[in-house]
Amino acid sequence: MVDLKYIKLILVPIFWGSSFVAVRAIAFHISPFTAAFFRFLFASLFLLGLSFTKHGSLPNPGKKHYAILVFLGLTGIFSYNYFFFSGLKIISAGRATVIVAFTPALVSVFSTIMFRERLTVIKIVGLFMALAGTLWVVSKGNPGSILKVNIGKGELYIFGCVVSWTLYSLIGKIALRELTPLTAITYSCLIGMVALILPAFIEGGFSSAGDYPLIVWIYFVYLGVFTAALAFIWYYEGIQKIGPTRSAVFINMVPLWGIVLGIVFLGEEASAILFLGAILVIVGVYLTNKPTTARVKQKKIGN
């Protein structure tokens, strides 16, 4: 029987893969802070509804957690989304996903330093295979071509996403020692959304909100509910149960799912390159999450 946490972690990159397409579609028409604000307005409303349904109220995290929740709101919500929307105004979604694919490696390195996560040879091989598969798919079988393109402002924005999400993943593990994923995500989204209000107002995005076409609002609801609220909760549940490294490696499936969705919904052509890249990513994710002998023994003892 497939573990539910892994089903959720597979769904997370599906949502995030589609978010690159959705954000790219609206990024040219709406300023970064304004777009990020509306995304997390809908995410926050959904999360509040979920919290009240589950707990009857919004749980009080306690004063000792305020600082860490503010940090999560400023990294995973405020800065990440500013970099995300700004970067996708300049570079293609495909190129952006290549840069984001380096996130698992960064998370893994710092998890080893901060939390002494055991980085086995199999895990390292898995991380590199997943990264190689991602580069292979996005570059259409020519990874060297990616290195030939100059690094500009757009690439630096997306690298800002990598740094922001790495911090959000690592500090999130600390927060999840005493908070539930739902509580941590709800507060970080609320804090991030509030932090986005002033920059969005300065951009002048609110004054033109009434002129947005219906499709833009549909994108905002989708981005808020599915690619933010649900995906963030499931990602944090993964961090809480299997750790940052093994959860973050699923990020390598983002570009793969983006291309698969293009084939299914846009009629784009499938290729042998895609299937080879998919195999590399899937095997890499499996190896990174493959139970070690110690974990198997521990699980048996627990049973």
Image: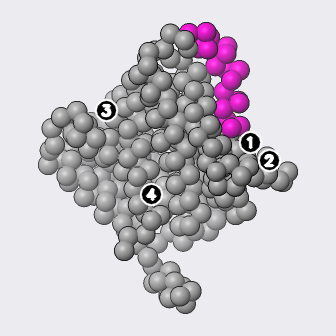
Alpha-carbon distance for marks 1 and 4? Answer: 26 Å
Q: Which mark is residue 148?
A: 3
User: Which residue corresponds to mark 4?
Assistant: 8
Name the residue at 55% across, 44% down. 229
Residue flagged by tag 2: what amino acid is it? Answer: Tyr
> How far across and down, in percent of the image, does residue 243 sit?
56, 64
Name the residue at 68% across, 23% down. 197
Alpha-carbon distance for marks 3 and 4? Answer: 36 Å
The region drawn magenta spans: 190-208
The reply to whether dot 1 and dot 4 touch (C-beta < 8 Å) is no
Q: Which mark is residue 66?
A: 2
Q: Main secondary structure of the magenta part?
A: helix
Name the residue at 35% across, 56% down. 130
The reply to whether dot 2 and dot 4 touch (C-beta < 8 Å) is no
Whether residue 10 appears in this view of the structure is yes
Nearest to N terminus: mark 3 or mark 1: 1
User: Which residue corresponds to mark 1?
Assistant: 70
1 or 4: mark nearer the eye: 4
Alpha-carbon distance for marks 2 and 1? Answer: 6 Å
Q: Residues within 10 Å of mark 2 (few under 14, many from 20)?
A: some
